[in-house]
Image: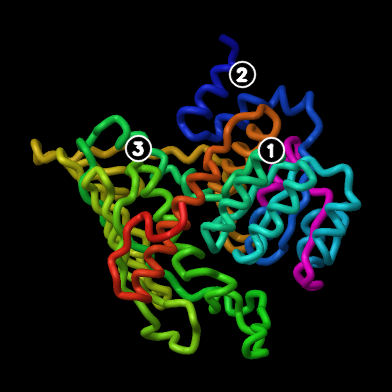
Amino acid sequence: MSDQTDRRAFLKTAGVSVLAAGASALEAQTQKPIRLAIVGTGARALAHLAILKLLPERFQVVALADPTPPNLARAAGMAPGAATYSDYRKMLSERKDIDAVVVITPSFLHAEVTVAVFGQGLPVLCEKPMATRVEDANRMIEASHAAGKPLYIGFQKRFQPAAMKMHELAAKGEIGAIQFVSANLFRGDWNPLGWKYTDPKTGVATNWRYLTFTEGSALLEDGIHELDTLNWILNAPVARVMASGGNNVFKQRETVDNAAVIVDYENGARLSFDFSLFAPNAGPGSRRMVLIGSDGVMQPENGKISIRSRASQAVRYVDLVDDAPAAAREGNVGSAMDGETYKQYLAFAETVRAGLPPVVAAEEGKNVIKLVLLAEKSLRTRRILTWHDLPA
């Protein structure tokens, strides 16, 4: 078996590693870069563009689309030679040199743009959440199937070294069957300079993350990363969702600023997830993830994964390796320049060039937005909801 075949087999089973960077250097030299168009050039797009500058052998940004001139100009400065468009539809109709499209718009526009891109027969990398409604996620999946092109959902946090290692160890049964998970996200508020949507009901221009129509749910915007990672590790169907939450500090917006979510899985496992937007200095407990199995407890701890067995007083520590280059982990550009986004683009290149299935499939993206939307509905209605209380 060739080195390239070995690499691709690993990517299929392990969820991708940066080892793809070195292992396919020769291959990259014999292929032209994938020509990308980016729709949406806000803060998150800057992180994408910074990472793409580190991958010139694999990607070339040839076009940018955004209706906001300052955002478009700033992004163009990071992608020399890329054509700029105020309307993505004009870009798609005029450009015949695009190999794939990255969608980084506000959440409520993901479905519209993605379906249009599939209408041109092009692959899509869509930022999370894939949509703000299950029906829209289904439209995106149907368009992907009709075009015969992949839809990759941008849950780059799956590539965090701790998440990948815990997924690996859980699958090996290191702590037995996972029975309970305790996790949280305590963070500061959204970017106050984010794009403002003019609500036709009020005529008031409002940060899009403060409106239910444009964001869907505060949990869809960021807590969804943790919920997706945990769903991936638990690997079980959801049975019931219950949540409580509201606006304790930011009272003048539609989307909540805190929530407590409990998810029951069909295999008996239970997840407790706490979320707050008014905790900018929460410290080391701001992103906690504790997995409790029938035989022990596992969690990130001091840069390693700790495993505490029920049968022993000793603590075992498993080392973590981040094989992303240092330049991809500087975190000084955009909203979240990180090694995980670097690895995500390596995986996307494999999907586009080699036809490998997306590491984060569209159905997985749909399932986690459904989970979040059930939590949102539960906290609004004060009811326990089942998986079947929203469309399939």
User: In the picture shown, does residue 181 fall above or below 1?
Assistant: below
> What residue lies at 75% left-to-right and 53% top-to-bottom?
116
Q: Amino acid at mark 1?
A: Lys
Q: Position of residue 111 (x, y in %)?
A: 64, 58
Residue 162: within the magenta? no
Q: Is residue 264 left or right of residue 326?
A: left
User: Height in image: 181 above or below 216?
Assistant: above
Q: Is residue 200 visible?
A: yes
Whether residue 329 is visible to the viewer of this picture, yes or no, is: no
For the magenta stretch, what is the residue range? 50-71
Give the residue drawn at x 29%, y 70%: 383
- Which residue, given by chain and number where applicable, does mark 1 sit on? 149
The residues bearing labels 3 and 2 have C-alpha atoms spaced at a distance of 27 Å
Marks 1 and 3 close (CB-CB < 8 Å): no
Residue receiving disc 3:
319
**What amino acid is at disc 3?**
Asp
In x, y percent, where is residue 249?
40, 85
SS at mark 3? strand
Given residues 356 and 63, the one toward you in this image is 356
Q: Nearer the viewer, residue 343 or 11?
A: 11
Residue on which disc 2 sits: 4
Q: Earlier in the sequence, mark 2 or mark 1?
A: 2
Task: Give the side of residue 142 with respect to residue 368, left or right.
Answer: right
Q: Residue furthest top?
A: 1
* Residue 320: percent from left, percent from top: 39, 39
Examine the structure image and report whether residue 60 is included in the region drawn in magenta.
yes
Of the numbered discs 1 and 3, the one sitting upstream in the chain is 1
